[in-house]
Image: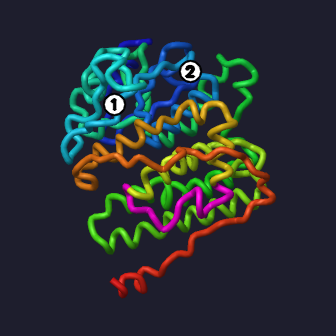
Amino acid sequence: MSTDTVLKIHEEGTADGWHGVISPQGPFQAEKGRYHLYIGLFCPFAHRANLVRHLKGLTEFIDISIVKPYPKGDEKGWPGWQFPKDDQEYPRATVDKLFGSKYLHEVYFKADKEYKGRYSVPMLWDKKTGTIVNNESAELLRWLPTALNSLLDPEHAKLDLYPEPLRTQIDSISDWLQRDLNTGVYKAGFAGSQAEYDKNVIPVFAALNKAEELIASNGGPYVLGKTLTELDIRLYATVVRFDTVYVQHFKCNLGTIRHDYPVINNWLKNLYWNVPGFKDSTDFLHIKENYTKSHYDINPKAITPMGPVPDVEEGIEDFSKLRVGAVKLPAVLEYQSKL
């Protein structure tokens, strides 16, 4: 690789982040052990990338470093996520296996010392060129599942999370799922006023109502029926955190998954207990302690609730025999008039 190519790669880091792709046509080629993934087990968006890593059999091809779930820093996020001093300091958090950094921002500055954006996870690092490939979770979710297919065994290579016949459906559903649920819980949770909260919490449950009907109409066990797709990853990363943190911490309490959405709950139980990779990539200690101990304005005493118990219920039922649940959505103006 020429010096000019390497310099160009390094210059692509901006406030908008990095948007590279592993492909035969670009500077980032498919090679075993070349790439390193930085994640937090607490983050639903990093969870997507790690789930792909598990589902596609990439755990031996792409190693990971895992930041601690807290502390994050001041109200602007500085100095950002930290690595433990050693692998025993916090369960399942790891040292920075590449550079031994104390903070994740140090790794970002290795790619671009003038970087002014967020020091976020997930972030995929290229050891060969010494820079970041990509730090956008939606982009990683889309191309990472096929990026290393040429190196994989046939069983893992054939798993297509974005199959051609389903792409129109996946794109359409992803739009409202991302807007109203995946990021919707954050819009409600970080609302700065009652009116802002009221406005944003209702679309969260409207999206859950739609997801409940969608899975039921397709008969399960996946969102689109018999085919596991990236929609299951998108939905899982939020739903597995819902009863645990979003209900109480983000005040998304119009209902719970386990009591109000029998179909989604059954879908969740099947993925968690029956599909390799989902349970393995889920860590409730990291999830609970991140939200409750790093959002000081929401939970100033940093007390972590004990429940719910269990984290995910057991016992998979026949999807065709389940009641299709829903939460009745309040009218915002009517609700506010009663305050």
Left or right position of 224 against 135:
right
Picture residue at 42% right of the left edge, 80% below the top: 332
Q: Which mark is residue 59?
A: 2
Few, some or many residues within 10 Å of mark 2 (<14, 14–19, 20+): some
Quick one: 236 or 162, which is closer to the camera?
236
Quick one: 132 or 180, which is closer to the camera?
180
Left or right position of 34 against 65:
right
- Please identify the quarter of the rendering in which residue 5 is found: top left
Q: Which mark is residue 251?
A: none
Tell which tag, 2 or 1, sits nearer the viewer: 1
Q: Which mark is residue 68?
A: 1
Q: Which residues are magenta?
A: 249-264
Question: Looking at numbered disc 1 in the image, what kind of residue is underneath it?
Answer: Lys
Q: Secondary structure at mark 2?
A: loop
Quick one: 90 or 209, which is closer to the camera?
90
Looking at the picture, does residue 94 appear above or below residue 289?
above
Left or right position of 195 against 246:
left
Q: Is residue 2 visible?
A: yes
User: Horizontal and vertical percent for residue 303?
Assistant: 29, 47
Picture residue at 57% right of the left edge, 50% below the top: 235
Quick one: 274 or 77, which is closer to the camera?
274
Q: Is residue 262 magenta?
A: yes
